[in-house]
Image (spheres, rainbow, N blue to C red):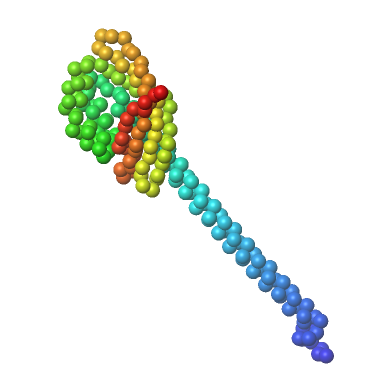
């Protein structure tokens, strides 16, 4: 036997290697645990970020769609061009083309009716959202107060279905139509 307590083959030498192996294992475990923690946190953040992005798109589409429905149901014959500008700015696709094409006829009809309409969306919700494609569908219940010149106001309620298309960063109506009741 050797006089060196750290020499290989001695009980004391094996104990040192064992301690070194335990320390190396502990360090490896710590590095692996830290890597797993960082991976888990980044994965959870990425997953949560996707949900947050979807929720943001949903809220933006619903808000824009609600405002567009209000714009299409609010007109004042004394400032008809402003109302028709809102129609044009709130629409895209075939609906926009229809608004632009019928602008003069709509202006004449609204001016001749001499009435003011004011819309309020009572309830609205998205029924479908494809954020990647930039498409959404919604339904809305709208109360419109119609005030003909010199007469008392009258209220009517309507249900609408709409399709929205994202243009750049803005959601716009591409289809707007009544929902039949009964």
Q: Is residue 33 left or right of residue 65?
A: right
Location of the C terminus (image quadrant): top left
Could you tell me which residue is drawn at 32 percent across and 30 percent down? 177
Could you tell me which residue is drawn at 64 percent across and 64 percent down? 30
Give the x, y percent position of residue 160.
36, 28
Compared with 108, 168 (above or below) is below
**Residue 69 visible here:** yes
Determine the image quadrant of residue 73. Answer: top left
Q: Is residue 87 left or right of residue 24?
A: left
Could you tell me which residue is drawn at 42 percent across and 39 percent down? 128
Compared with 98, 52 (above or below) is below
Could you tell me which residue is drawn at 32 percent across and 21 percent down? 118
Q: Nearer the viewer, residue 86 or 21?
A: 86
Taking the view exactly as shown, the residue that stands out farthest to the front is: 182
Q: Is residue 21 left or right of residue 150?
A: right
Give the x, y percent position of residue 47.
51, 51
Q: Nearer the viewer, residue 26 or 152?
A: 152
Compared with 156, 163 (above or below) is below
Determine the image quadrant of residue 11. Answer: bottom right
Location of the N terminus (image quadrant): bottom right
Determine the image quadrant of residue 79. Answer: top left
């Amino acid at each position: 036997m050797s006089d060196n307590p750290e020499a290989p083959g001695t009980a004391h030498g094996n104990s040192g290697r064992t301690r070194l192996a335990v320390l190396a294992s502990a360090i490896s475990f710590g590095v692996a645990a830290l890597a797993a923690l960082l991976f888990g946190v980044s994965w959870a953040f990425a997953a949560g970020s996707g949900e947050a992005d979807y929720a943001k798109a949903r809220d933006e589409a619903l808000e824009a769609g609600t405002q567009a429905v209000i714009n299409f149901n609010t007109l004042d014959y004394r400032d008809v061009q402003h109302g028709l500008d809102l129609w044009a700015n709130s629409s895209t696709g075939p609906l926009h083309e229809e608004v632009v094409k019928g602008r003069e006829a709509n202006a004449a009809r609204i001016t001749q009716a001499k009435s003011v309409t004011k819309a309020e969306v009572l309830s609205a919700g998205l029924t479908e959202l494809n954020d990647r494609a930039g498409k959404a569908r919604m339904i809305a219940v709208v109360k419109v107060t119609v005030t003909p010149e010199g007469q008392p106001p009258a209220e009517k309620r309507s249900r609408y279905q709409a399709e929205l298309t994202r243009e750049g960063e803005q959601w716009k109506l591409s289809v707007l139509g009544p929902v039949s009741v009964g």
